[in-house]
């Protein structure tokens, strides 16, 4: 099942013009290949540690829809951060069956959300003319921490899935970079003229040579991988007409120029989709929360655990969220999870009797 079939199955019912922002020239000769690292080494995360993580992040209580469809258009891909005590959610709207625009909402309590407007409209020309699915970069990843979006070089940064075609995620999709002086208002972001990563890059691996999807970028100030910025994202490979999505890593020291890390994906479930990763740190463990689809029934959220950001052990137990209610009976997937004041809030895309919306599950009844 490809992404177009996925949309049909799921359907229940530009930022500013470039302002001269440019990217560095492409890769130096020594950067034409992925950074060599052995991804086959198994993770040494124990059964007890995996179970403890599950108990910490599980969200069995369905709160319901917190952002419904907008004028009949689907909304999707929540991404939450905090500024000055106020919560903000980036999300996408699939506008008029044309493409993705990036939007923002705010909340005082993580339950009631007020849409503020659009931060990236259609640009109508260029490589990202009709698609922008946003992600806030450099959000505090410490579990139960501030969830603050951090400044780098005096600006707030965002990555996004972009494309030039109209419709539901037409190939190829690429990764773009944007910034804002104020991440909390519905003012248009400044986008760079060229993508920062694309399927045709010299160091692209086989699993990402058709399309690149959702990104999350963390700021690892200890440079565990010898770079301060680490990007996780899912890429698509098509073989004999069948598409598979897997999760890989890229690294950077300036957010603008990236190198792939490793010769393949770090999360591979063999078929279907593994995508939309979020990274948090719980104690001395890194946790990747992501969604799965079609390698098990329907679509759901699950996780993996690592000690080193590279070698991951996948959870094989109960899903974090899965279809169970009329509003998410088809799919419950695409996570963003935060812990605040002792409660875990798990935002996800719910597809069911109210179309494609953003819903919430929590660790206890609210």
Image (cartoon, helix red, strand yellow):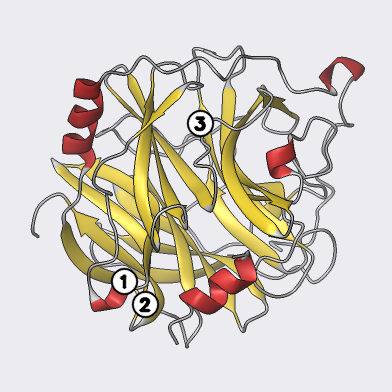
Residue located at (61% from left, 65% from top): 3
**Circle 2 sits on which residue?**
68
Q: Which of the pair 69/6 is nearer the observer?
A: 6
In the image, is 93 to the left or to the right of 132? left
In the image, is 223 to the left or to the right of 127? left
Q: Which of the pair 28/147 is nearer the observer?
A: 28
Residue 158 appears in the picture as rendered: no
Lower position in the chain sequence, tag 2 or tag 1? 2
Give how far across and how far down residue 95 sits, in percent. 60, 78
Among the 4 quarters of the image, the one containing residue 83: top left
In the rendered image, the vertical position of residue 180 relative to residue 71, given as above or below: above
**Circle 3 sits on which residue?**
218
- Quadrant location of the N terminus? bottom right
Assign a secondary structure to mark 3.
strand
Q: Residue furthest front?
A: 240
Give how far across and how far down residue 44 sits, in percent. 36, 14
**Circle 1 sits on which residue?**
328
Residue located at (43% from left, 83% from top): 12
- Quadrant location of the C terminus? bottom left
In the image, is 48 to the left or to the right of 238? left
């Amino acid at each position: 099942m490809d992404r177009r079939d996925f949309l049909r199955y799921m359907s229940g019912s530009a930022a500013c013009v470039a302002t001269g922002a440019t990217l560095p020239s492409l890769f130096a000769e020594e950067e034409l290949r992925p950074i060599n690292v052995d991804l086959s080494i198994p993770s040494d995360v124990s059964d007890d540690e995996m179970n403890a993580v599950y108990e910490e992040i599980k969200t069995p209580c369905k709160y319901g829809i917190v952002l419904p469809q907008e004028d009949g258009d689907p909304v999707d891909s929540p991404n939450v951060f905090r500024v000055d005590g106020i919560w903000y959610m980036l999300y996408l709207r699939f506008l008029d069956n044309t493409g993705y625009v990036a939007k923002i909402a705010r909340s005082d309590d993580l339950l009631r959300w007020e849409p503020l407007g659009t931060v990236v409209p259609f640009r109508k020309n260029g490589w990202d003319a009709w698609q922008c699915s946003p992600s806030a970069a450099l959000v505090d990843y410490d579990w139960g921490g501030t969830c603050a979006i951090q400044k780098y070089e005096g600006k707030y940064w965002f990555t996004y899935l972009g494309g030039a075609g109209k419709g539901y995620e037409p190939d190829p999709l690429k990764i773009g970079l944007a910034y804002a002086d104020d991440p909390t208002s519905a003012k248009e972001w400044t986008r760079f003229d060229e993508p920062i990563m694309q399927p045709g890059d010299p160091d692209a691996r086989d699993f990402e040579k058709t399309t690149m999807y959702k990104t999350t970028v963390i700021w690892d100030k200890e440079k565990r991988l010898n770079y301060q910025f680490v990007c996780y994202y899912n890429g698509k490979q098509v073989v004999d007409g069948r598409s598979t999505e897997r999760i890989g890593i890229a690294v950077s020291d300036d957010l603008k120029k990236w190198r792939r890390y490793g010769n393949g994906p770090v999360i591979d479930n063999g078929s279907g989709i593994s995508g939309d990763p979020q990274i948090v740190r719980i104690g001395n463990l890194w946790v990747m929360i992501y969604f799965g689809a079609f390698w098990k029934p329907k679509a759901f959220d699950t996780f993996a655990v690592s000690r080193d950001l590279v070698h991951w052990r996948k959870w094989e137990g109960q899903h974090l969220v899965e279809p169970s209610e009329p509003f998410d009976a088809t799919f419950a997937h695409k996570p963003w999870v935060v812990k605040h004041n002792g409660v875990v809030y798990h935002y996800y895309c719910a597809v069911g009797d109210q179309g494609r919306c953003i819903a919430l599950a929590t660790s206890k009844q609210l």
